[in-house]
Image (cartoon, rainbow, N blue to C red):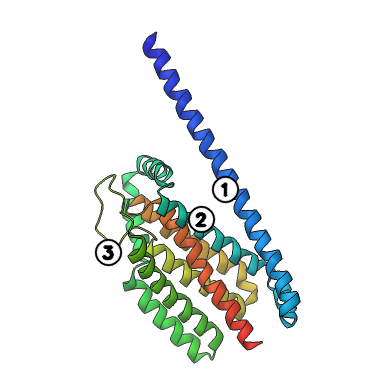
Amino acid sequence: MTIFRGALENISRRCFGELMMAFEWIKDIIKLALIAASLYLALGAYVDRKQPAHTGFLQKRRFSVLLLLVLAVTAIKLGEDVVSGESGPVDELVLQFIHVNVPVTFLGYFEAVTRTGSAYILLPLLSVTLAALVFARRRFEAWLLAVSVTSAWLVVYALKSVVGRARPALWQTEWYWGSSFPSGHTLVVAAFAAAAAISISRIWPEKRIFAILIATTWIFSVAISRLVLGVHWPTDVLAAACIGVFLPLAAGIALELRRA
């Protein structure tokens, strides 16, 4: 009877802990949404007062600007949690759950997926794509892709050097260069995929949804592969995805404003 009571207490404690964690996540999501909305309203008021010529552009690109702010606020919040160590318990819980529930037979697939985010794949792909865009005289798209991917690599190097987070050591994994935060594979793939999706949407507007779907699938697949292989924490890939999508959005807006 004592053993049974103890088991019930452990289950109750665990359920309560997970419930409190869920409430914390909901609270953080609401807080981030309010911050992003406030920043958007403040930006709109500033543009109306100081840069009225850009008011029309802000209205035209309001979804992109709002998404930009959401990504920036989320990435900053995740970075703060990583540096302060607050994300540790959640990271470990999620990573252990993935490790236990993903069959070993799928490891080969995820290893192949993760290679699509390596420099051996992305550098040739970037070179061919840039050459094609230049040949087609799509200068805006070429600049967007080049700036997005180059800045992504620079951000990865800078953040890995500054944060210096230890990689997961929950089970034996392959060695990778650099610290854990952020996930370089995820960040660069996100920047490349988002820039490519924006470019395709500009060149072939009718293929916009398809391009976004392919880009999202690629980013998500690479991010999950880093977790399945146990070489990154969940916050590493989530922050990387936010930063990676942020860069081409910001670059695209900057290039459009320069041309205006």
Q: Residue 77: which numbered mark, if any? A: 2
| Residue 172: x %, y % from top left | 24, 48
Mark positioned earlier in the residue sequence (2 or 3): 2
Q: Hey, what amino acid is under mark 1?
A: Asp
What is the x, y in percent for residue 209? 61, 66
Q: In the drawing, what numbered circle is on residue 28?
A: 1
- Disc 1: CA contacts within 10 A as few (<14), some (14-19) or many (>=20): some
Assess whether mark 1 and mark 2 are in contact (beta carbons under 8 angstroms). Answer: yes
Q: Quadrant of the C terminus?
A: bottom right
Q: Is residue 120 left or right of residue 244?
A: left
Q: Quadrant of the N terminus?
A: top left
- Mark 3 and mark 1 lie on one chain; the one further toward the N terminus is 1
User: Residue at 41% of width from left, 70% of height from top?
Assistant: 155
Q: CA distance from mark 2 to mark 3?
A: 25 Å
Residue drawn at point x = 31 percent, y = 54 percent: 167
Q: Position of residue 80 (x, y in %)?
A: 46, 55
Identify the secondary structure beneath mark 1: helix
Tag 3 residue: 177
Q: Residue at x 52, y 90 (%)?
A: 136
Query: Under tag 2, what secondary structure?
Result: helix
Q: Secondary structure at mark 3?
A: loop
For residue 59, above or below residue 28: below
Residue 152 disc label: none
**Is 97 placed left or right of 67 in the picture?**
left
